[in-house]
Amino acid sequence: LWRNMVDFLGETLGSSFEAVLFDLQQADLPAVYHRNATQASIGAMRELVQQTLASEWVRRQGYCVNRGISLDFSQMLKTSVLFLPGEKEEDPPAAALCVAVHCGMFLRLMNLASEMISLDHRDLDSTSPEEPVVPRKESPSLEMIDRILAQQCIDPATATQGDRIEAIVELYEAGVFEIKGAVAKTAEALGISQKSVYRYLAKIKQARS
């Protein structure tokens, strides 16, 4: 029955959603069935199930919803857990059904929509040009790589060439590539080779020369 539910959720909701069924009667909480899930997301959801099992109020309620799970700097899942009852009402839950949605695509759409509907309603006759505020430039660091890629919601598995170039341009402008190890860390974060990063950098420098 519950495997049919997992199949139904996977097919109905689409590839952006994951459904995983965990066996709570075994100590290691194995995932006995899933649709659209990866080993990384299954592991993260198992940790969430362990946390919910340790929470008395969640076990009493039987479910928790809208819990955020970060797989890495670029992948965020919004996850809900439903405990499935045992044979008798007084028995502990026998299984847990997790349903998660990848938020990256929706965050990018939200940011795009926000930019599109952002309007300036000031009266042009009553406004005077303001001096732009020059932001203080942040000192480059390797931590900026994770932060910038997270802000752009880049998923290495689905990122296009344009996404990667945009990210590398921003990192280049921030001066990150002046730091030792930045090329290697960027290549790993974007899921490409260091040679590809150097090739992108060469194109950026050529375009600006």
Image: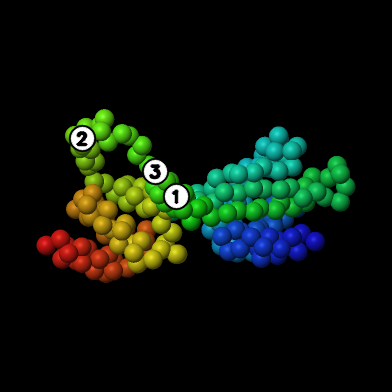
Tell whether 114 sits left or right of 5.
left
Report whether residue 135 is seen.
yes
Q: Which residue is mark 2?
A: 129
Which x, y percent locates residue 52? Answer: 66, 42
Q: Is residue 136 above or below residue 208?
A: above
Tell whether 18 sits left or right of 171.
right
Tell whether 159 sits left or right of 32.
left
Which of the labelled discs sits on residue 113, or is there none? 1
Which of the labelled discs sits on residue 160, or is there none? none
Marks 1,2: beta carbons within 8 A: no
| Residue type of the residue flagged with mark 2 | Pro
Task: Please identify the quarter of the rendering in which residue 196 is found.
Answer: bottom left
* Inter-mark Cα distance, 1 to 3: 9 Å
Secondary structure type for disc 2: loop
Marks 1,3: beta carbons within 8 A: no
Q: Is residue 182 above or below residue 54?
A: below
Q: Which residue is mark 3?
A: 118
Residue at (30%, 62%) from the top-left corner? 165
Residue at (86%, 42%) from the top-left corner? 90
Q: Looking at the image, which is closer to me, 106 or 39?
A: 106
Which x, y percent locates residue 154? Answer: 41, 57
